[in-house]
Image (cartoon, rainbow, N blue to C red):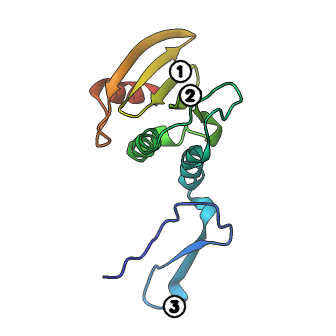
């Protein structure tokens, strides 16, 4: 069986581009640069956290575990397109105690999601008032809880 990758998963190789056939012959071949896939930069940012060592911040920080990074990647892959488009690479950070935080902001609303080894926590802030808080919510990597789905819907 032959597998063809139609979307790159990394920006590390600047010359890499995807090609596919859009029609009947070679004249219909289409090539797109990696930059058309903004998710590559976000995935690179998240997987880069695996390279952090103990005390990565000089103050005793613990690096995110493989499980925390994997859960973050799963969450990112499940995001609705409108929510995904709100996320910038600088909105993804790792904390000093081994979790990853993604902040989604639109106008006067902020949804901050913290992902760990087994679950996640999040809060919604609107007009500088916290309107929703969830802690220690299990995340199966397949679907969001109904509360997190509602929070994403409120955001967009």
Residue 79 can be seen, yes or no: no
Nearest to the eye among marks 2 and 3: give it. Answer: 2
Left/right placement of residue 86 relative to residue 140 reads right
> Of the residues under marks 2 and 3, which one precedes in the sequence?
3
The quadrant holding residue 14 is: bottom right
Number of on-image labels: 3
Q: CA distance from mark 2 to mark 3?
A: 43 Å
Q: Nearer the viewer, residue 99 or 42?
A: 99
Q: Are marks 2 and 1 in contact (CB under 8 Å)?
A: yes
**Going by the image, does 136 lie left or right of 65?**
left
Where residue 88 sits in the image (x, y, percent)?
61, 40
Secondary structure state at the residue bearing disc 2? strand
Instruction: Name the residue beneath numbered marker 2.
Output: 105
Checking the image for residue 26, the label placed there is: 3
Which of 23 and 138 lies nearest the eye of the viewer? 138
Mark 1 and mark 3 lie on one chain; the one further toward the N terminus is 3
Q: Position of residue 141 (x, y in %)?
A: 32, 41
Q: Does residue 83 appear to the left or right of 141 in the view shown?
A: right
Q: CA distance from mark 2 to mark 1?
A: 6 Å
SS of the residue under disc 1: strand
Which residue is painted at 58% across and 33% down in the image?
94
State whether residue 25 appears in this view. yes
Q: State the residue position of label 1.
A: 109
- Check disc 1: other Cα within 10 Å, few if <14, some if 14-19, many if 20+: some
**Looking at the image, residue 135 lies above or below residue 40:** above
Circle 2 crowding by C-alpha within 10 Å: few under 14, some 14–19, many from 20? many
Locate residue 129, reporting x and y percent. 52, 8
Residue 41's x, y, as percent? 60, 52
Q: Secondary structure at mark 3?
A: helix
């Amino acid at each position: 069986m032959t597998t063809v990758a139609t979307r790159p998963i990394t920006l590390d190789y600047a010359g890499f581009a995807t090609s596919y056939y859009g029609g009947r012959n070679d004249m219909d071949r289409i090539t797109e640069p990696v930059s058309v896939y903004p998710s590559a930069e976000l995935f690179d940012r998240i997987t880069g956290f695996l390279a952090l060592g103990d005390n990565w911040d000089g103050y005793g920080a613990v690096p995110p575990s493989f499980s925390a990074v994997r859960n973050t990647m799963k969450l990112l892959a499940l995001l609705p397109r409108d929510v995904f488009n709100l996320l910038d690479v600088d909105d993804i950070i790792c904390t000093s105690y081994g979790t990853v935080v993604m902040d989604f902001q639109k106008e006067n609303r902020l949804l901050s999601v913290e992902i760990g080894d087994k679950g996640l926590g999040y809060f919604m802030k609107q007009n500088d008032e916290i309107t929703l808080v969830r802690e220690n919510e299990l995340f199966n990597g397949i679907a969001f809880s109904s509360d997190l789905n509602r929070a994403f819907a409120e955001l967009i």
